[in-house]
Image (cartoon, rainbow, N blue to C red):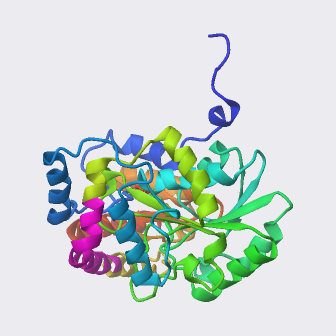
Amino acid sequence: MKHSYLAQRVATLKPSGIRKFFDIVATMKDVISLGIGEPDFVTPPPILQAGIQSLQNGETHYTSNAGRLDLRQELSDHLDRLYGVRYDPVTEMVITVGVSEALYLALTAILDPGDEVIIPTPCFVAYQAEVILAGGVPVEVPSRMEDNFQPNPEAIEAAITSRTKAILIGYPNNPTGAVASRDTLQEILCLSDKYDLIVISDEIYDRLVYGLPHVCFASLQGGRGRTITLGGFSKDYAMTGWRIGYAAAPAELLKGMLRIHQYTIMSAPTMAQAAALEALKTGEPHLQDMLAEFDRRRKLIVGGLNDLGLPTFEPHGAFYAFPKIAATGMDDETFSEMLLEEERVAIVPGSAFGAGGEGFARCSYATAYEKIEEALQRLERFMKRHG
Ligand SMILES: Cc1ncc(COP(=O)(O)O)c(C=O)c1O
């Protein structure tokens, strides 16, 4: 081949900062990983069993494109119960292959080439890439630790241009653990009304909150009509490998998304949809058990990091702590690489999550309590040498 056949937007896409780092981790022994972005728990038994039963019942065929209707109905009730938002299961919901696919559908459905999407950062590593893959232009607006990593409405407004089509938010946030306040979300809604923008709200960590309520963006008065709500089962129910998520949106938007889904995916995995249905029906006590354990670990790691002189914002959601490591005089990549090399502790450099992440690192507490204790001891040794 004389030249690359890859499309320019693919060829120029940067590999995820997380992947690069974990390729190194995979070659090492005795590493304690605080780098993982998924629950360490196995999917709770009744949910697991529902998936197995579905296979044994011979449910090995496609479902309807939008997903099993009973799952969409249950999900619609679930969102109504939790947030008072009612979506029509027939015309306003699609079951997807994780939130990853739901995000892809939302962006591909609304973006024309060159359309801009405003993204408060630091954020999940796929946001910018998915916007580019959908032909759009990501516009990062950093949020700051001094503002509790809330998205900054003034900075968002300043970034709006005639090409802006949407604002993409993800709260509870990966990687900061911030939960967006009702007031902040209300301000974002005002902006989206003023400039006629769509809000894509990734609420995959909606149930993983500690002491603060999660506000569903579509539940804000007047919010539902311009919101694409994305949610899933990966984090709340420890189901990353099942690959089930969903999108809920006004019928016209959903129709466009469903068209893309029809031609690219057909339908989400059938046995996994059965498991997701079970999660909604009987998963709550299991979710509460996992949440209590996450909370125990959260207190351990946040207290431990602060005691070591690494200022750490108190995360009220998801399962990440986001210490500021700038005080050590190292940049976040050097800090993470040296910590891995010298003490075999894997964390993720904050700059992997976009502007606003530089000088920080993401430490996941979705790992056993004892391992976090050991990681903190190793970090203490490291800080004594370099702090
Ligand atoms: C904020 C956020 N959104 C979406 C995803 C993707 O989740 P799924 O497994 O549902 O594709 C992740 C996974 O880490 C995430 O952190």
Whether 87 is drawn above or below 139: the answer is below
Secondary structure mainly formed by the magenta segment: helix
> Residue reaching furthest top?
1
Count of number-bearing discs: 0
* Residue most extreme to the front: 90
Out of 190 and 238, give the one closest to the viewer: 190
* 338 versus 287 height, above or below: above
The image quadrant of residue 210 is bottom left
Residue 31 visible within the image: no
At 29% from the left edge and 77% from the top edge, which residue is drawn? 291
From the top left corner, tell me how far across and down residue 113 is, in percent.
76, 44
Question: Which segment is the magenta one?
Answer: 275-298
Ligand 1 image position (quadrant): bottom left
Q: Along the line of sight, which residue is nearer the eye, 384 or 32?
A: 32
Magenta-drawn stretch contains 302: no
Q: Residue at x 75, y 56 (%)?
A: 116
Residue 247 in the image: above or below residue 65 = below
Magenta run includes residue 286: yes
Quarter-wise, where is residue 70 in the image?
A: bottom left
Is residue 196 left or right of 248 when viewed as pictured?
right
In the rendered view, does 367 fall on the left or right side of 256?
Answer: left
Point out the image quarter for the N terminus: top right
Q: Residue 20 location, x and y as percent? A: 48, 42
